[in-house]
Amino acid sequence: MALGLYTLLLRLGLPIVALRQWFRHRGEAGQHADWREILGYYSERSIRSVFWLHAASANSVLAAAPLARALRAQYPDHEILITSSTIAGREALRQAFGNQVLLAYLPYDLPGATRRFLEHFRPRLGVVIGVEVWPVLLAACRRHGVPMMLANARLSSNLARSYARFGTLSRSAFGCLTASCAQDRATSRRLRRLGAEAVTVAGNMIFDTQSDPVKVEEGRALMAALRGRKALLFASTCDGEEAMLLDALGQDDGTLIIIVPRHPERYAAVAELAAARGMNVARRSQGEAPHVGRRVFLGDTVGEMPFYYAVSTVAIIGGSFTSVGGQDPIEACAAGVPAVIGPHMVEFAEATRAALVANAAIRVIDAGEAIHVARNLLDIREWRERMALAGLKLSAAHRGATERHLAVCRRLLPPTPPHFD
């Protein structure tokens, strides 16, 4: 009953969702995405057996990389399919994997679209990176015998309450999962309360990520070209945060400000926002270098965080100064960049706690204090070096999550391929 009502409402809302997606991504490269895929019609097909991973966000793409590599090494006779839900997600996957994997859009959660998707790719195993639960798709996977698992799952108390509001629909969806790998014990408890079974605590695969060495070297080359000029990174900022942080900067002291907005559709608006404050802006996408006289370097490209971290001296973590709930500070720790974190980190509470306990990050109360602390870090080399080393040690100590995820994948593989006829 609940699933039928959900499907009906989704059918009625499909035109609105499609229009929203078009307006959100208009003007982006690739805006004329293949909408046939979103409805479950695909042209590319593998002649080999397929392992399917779904990565909805930039954070999920980071976590997907080590697991995709591990699956490919363990099962070289299988193809890796990775799906995304947005144009930006597709571009991030293309940047991360190139032509080493199959890329496709996840279909809308409608019976016909999900059936066509499964019959076309015939996956032996499905892995959702994070916590993104689609009731119709999960029910279809169960019917066809496709084992499904959540990987690198991180479920905040707010998100858990949101899922719980859907009652029977959520419980039936989580109950269709064959297994779940949680990042921490709190997530494990919340998943079980929502109806998930076979939940294990496997850690955070982002600790196992390997930054693109080409991007890292490119970033280090730019840092050398700056000739001692320090760089302060505003990492994955959300709407409203750039204005707060830029207004708190005060007079130009020669520090290069690198801004990487979380959402690509905001790139142009952030460039205009900085220019309106009299700041000369260099845009990465246009090949502009941050020469002397350019105060802001806008990171308006997708999938290049290793490059931006390699240039940076200190990072202020975005999403943490609004109600968004923060962004993951682990990438900064793994890059050896001291992290300054705002007050709102509910979505990354465990990762934040680990970074703070390790003294790899500092928490502040608002944007003004963030700039004040960041300036002190820029001035005190010994302090920066202690925090950088702490971040690297924290990352090294938490590696191994990918192998634990891979062990679960091995247990889930059915002895015979799933049935699609």
Image: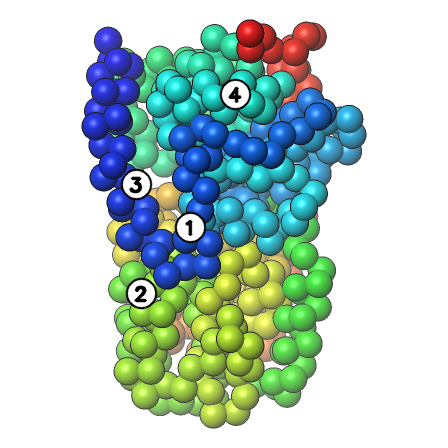
> Dot 3: few (<14), some (14–19), or many (≥20) neighbours within 10 Å?
few
C-alpha separation, residue under disc 4 versus residue under disc 2: 41 Å
The answer to whether residue 291 of the structure is visible from this angle is: yes
Q: Secondary structure at mark 4?
A: helix
Task: Give me the residue at 55% from left, 77% from top.
Answer: 287
Residue at mark 1: 32
C-alpha separation, residue under disc 4 versus residue under disc 3: 22 Å
Q: Earlier in the sequence, mark 4 or mark 1?
A: 1
Q: Earlier in the sequence, mark 4 or mark 3?
A: 3
Mark in front: 4 vs 2:
4
Q: Secondary structure at mark 3?
A: helix
Q: Earlier in the sequence, mark 2 or mark 3?
A: 3
C-alpha separation, residue under disc 1 versus residue under disc 2: 30 Å
Residue type at mark 4: give it.
Leu
C-alpha separation, residue under disc 1 versus residue under disc 3: 12 Å
Q: Are marks 4 and 2 in contact (CB under 8 Å)?
A: no
> Dot 2: few (<14), some (14–19), or many (≥20) neighbours within 10 Å?
some
Place of residue 319 in the rendered image (x, y in percent of width and height, measured from the top left): 36, 56
Identify the mark at residue 241; answer none if there is no mark: 2
Mark in front: 1 vs 2:
1
Q: Are marks 4 and 3 in contact (CB under 8 Å)?
A: no
Residue at mark 3: 18
Residue at mark 4: 118
**Front residue (pair 170, 34):** 34
